[in-house]
Amino acid sequence: MKFGIIGLGNIGRVHAKNIQDGLIDGADLVAVANQPAASMDDFKQQNIACFGDASELIASGICDAVIVALPTHLHAPIGIQALEAGLHLIMEKPLACHKAEGERILAAKQRDDQIIALMMNQRTHPCYTKIKQWIDEGALGGLQRVSWTMTNWFRPEIYYASSPWRATWKGEGGGVLMNQCPHNIDVLQWLVGMPTKVRASCSFGKYHDIEVEDEVNAFFEFANGATGQFTASTGESPGTNRLEIVGDSGTIITDGNSVKLISNKESVSAFSKSTDEMFGSPETVEKNFQPLEAVNQHAAILNNVVQAAAGKAALISPAIEGLNSLELAGAMIYSSWINDEVNLPLDGAAYEIAIQEKIAQSKPRKVVQTAAKVDMSKSYR
């Protein structure tokens, strides 16, 4: 598969390196597009086609697939153009700035075998794949409660000051929910499904000089009566990563480094009805999972895309499922705006009207001209 990469910021160069290092079987990097032209000098020296405009790369006919690694507000126009040209599309997260925009991207698909994937790479994280396996095997029984405290996404002020589009309604459509937490929101709904109701409190610019949310506290209700809680922040350090999923038959706990499954020998509901012990509780057994080695998650997603295009695998992260994380993030933001509960599915048209009002008032950030130290490995969770 001949890949083109549109956008050579931090993450775009990560994808380029993975392909060039031979980590993606059956893939070649043949083209890149970026501004300014000087930023592509290293690719020119390797005889990779360089374009100053995304449209030129898409129209060149030399690519089978493109990875779009641009600011979020450019995802829709460039993604639609790539799909209409018949290319496979791999979109960096999030899919779009809001649900309705994401739906327009998906509607641009030209044929059934055209791949539209989303870089929801944490679906390949060993801890989360193990949790998915246990849940699919029925280890938890019916869902009772889920809670995720994800506050170790700390970002200093220089992070926001490095780009004019970052942490603006126009540039990203949100803050911690749209930039850092799409991964967590995606994994959450991938594991336990979508809630039916959301009530959230978002703090906008609480810890940073930004116009979007940098702290979120949300409460969920699911169709079976189960409840959920989601807390996120870019203003805490060292922060916490703790996911608990509680079911009738057991509990799963992870900090992203290891996973614990505590299984009840008898389900809570059955034990509660049958026991004669006033202060009794079901006996438990415990399993622990510790990944033996790290996984290059971005490479894993791209390998899967190549395999899926060849008809040899199902997509791990189809873009259509990215609508769920957009919907859930939007519901949390919208709940804060209206100070009320939001029912899901989210009314995408109504939310688009609301966010367009924010976008109309949005202002580009003033970029601070300073040499920021960038270590992308520290951005992964």
Image (cartoon, helix red, strand yellow):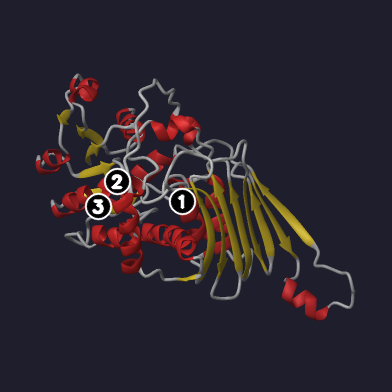
Q: Is residue 178 left or right of residue 245?
A: left
Mark carried by residue 76? 3
Of marks 3 and 2, the one in the foreground = 3
Q: Is residue 17 left or right of residue 280?
A: left
Helix, strand or loop under label 1: loop
Query: Mark 3 and 2 residues: CB-CB less than 8 Å, in contact?
Result: no
Asked if disc 1 and disc 3 are in contact, CB closer than 8 Å, the reply is: no
The 10 Å Cα crowd at callout 3, few under 14, some 14 to 19, many 20 or more, is many
Q: Amino acid at mark 2?
A: Val
The amino acid type, in three-letter code, at marker 1 is Leu
Q: Is residue 68 above or below residue 309?
A: above
Kindly identify the residue that appears in the image at 42 percent across and 35 percent down.
160
Q: Residue at x 21, y 30 (%)?
A: 35
Q: Secondary structure at mark 2?
A: helix
Residue for badge 1: 177
Residue 306 is tagged as: 2
* Residue 58, position as x, y percentages in the image: 14, 43
* Residue type of the residue flagged with mark 3: Ala
Q: Pinpoint residue 226: horizontal percent, then vertical percent.
A: 61, 70
Q: Compare residues 381 and 342 and report the one nearer the observer.
A: 342
Q: Give percent across and percent down for residue 113.
A: 22, 58
